[in-house]
Image (cartoon, helix red, strand yellow):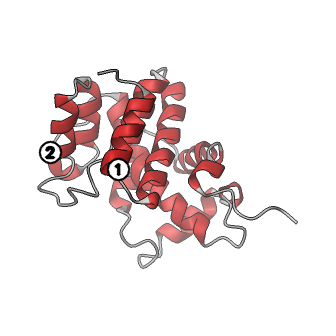
Amino acid sequence: MMIDRQSAWDLLCEYTGSDSLRKHALGVEAAMRAMAVKYDGDPDTWGITGLLHDFDYEKYPTAQEHPFKGVEILKGLGYPQEIMDAIMGHAEYTGVERKTLMAKSLFAVDELVGFVFAVTYVRPSKAVRDVVPKSIRKKLKQKSFAASVNRDDIVQGILELELEENEHFQFVIDALAGVAEEVGLAGTAPE
């Protein structure tokens, strides 16, 4: 099997019917491609890792199954170990240590991408271009806002890569702005 972006997309679509989960995957892919450039990684490998990190979640949503089932599928398809290790490491409960910059980057962007989506949805313009780090910090303090987003994972991801919080927030906002149309974050046209 060819391991390329198209085959990864096809695999995602085979297992994930939800538009919101597909958009999340595309958002994480964009953030991972940007992280690859930042850390001299391979944008295709890092992007595919981001695209596929939750591909099994819709069919196997429990902690006993996700991402274990997905990694079994990827192994059977001949995906590289570094991709499978990063995907395992994005879920704290797997106990898989994040040893590579790619694995740490996936962990550092996954929950944050979801949170930026949520912050964007409550903006009057519904446009990620209008989200600023201050808005993210403010909303992170509101435990009831996007309550399913694991704030501890966001903090831990920033710590593991020794990132400055505002810069990382802006970095992810910028990555998502680059795919805003594709992921539904372009908002309404400016007046």
Specify the quadrant of the image occupied by residue 106.
top left
**SS assignment at label 1:** helix
**SS assignment at label 2:** loop
Which amino acid type is shown beneath numbered disc 1?
Answer: Gln
Instruction: Give the residue drawn at x 40%, y 55%.
Output: 111
Tell me if residue 157 comes above or below residue 82 in the rendering.
Answer: below
Instruction: Give the residue drawn at x 60%, y 64%.
Output: 120
Q: How many labels does the image show?
A: 2
Residue with the mark numbered 1 = 156
Residue with the mark numbered 2 = 95
Please identify the residue farthest to the left as the structure is shown: 64
Tell me if residue 60 comes above or below residue 174 in the rendering.
Answer: below
Can residue 8 be seen in the rendering of this structure?
yes
Give residue 52's position: percent from left, percent from top: 35, 40
Looking at marks 2 and 1 on the same chain, the residue that comes earlier in the sequence is marked by: 2
Quadrant of image for the N terminus: top left
Can residue 107 be seen in the rendering of this structure?
no
Specify the quadrant of the image occupied by residue 191.
bottom right
Which amino acid type is shown beneath numbered disc 2?
Answer: Gly
Give residue 122's position: percent from left, percent from top: 61, 73
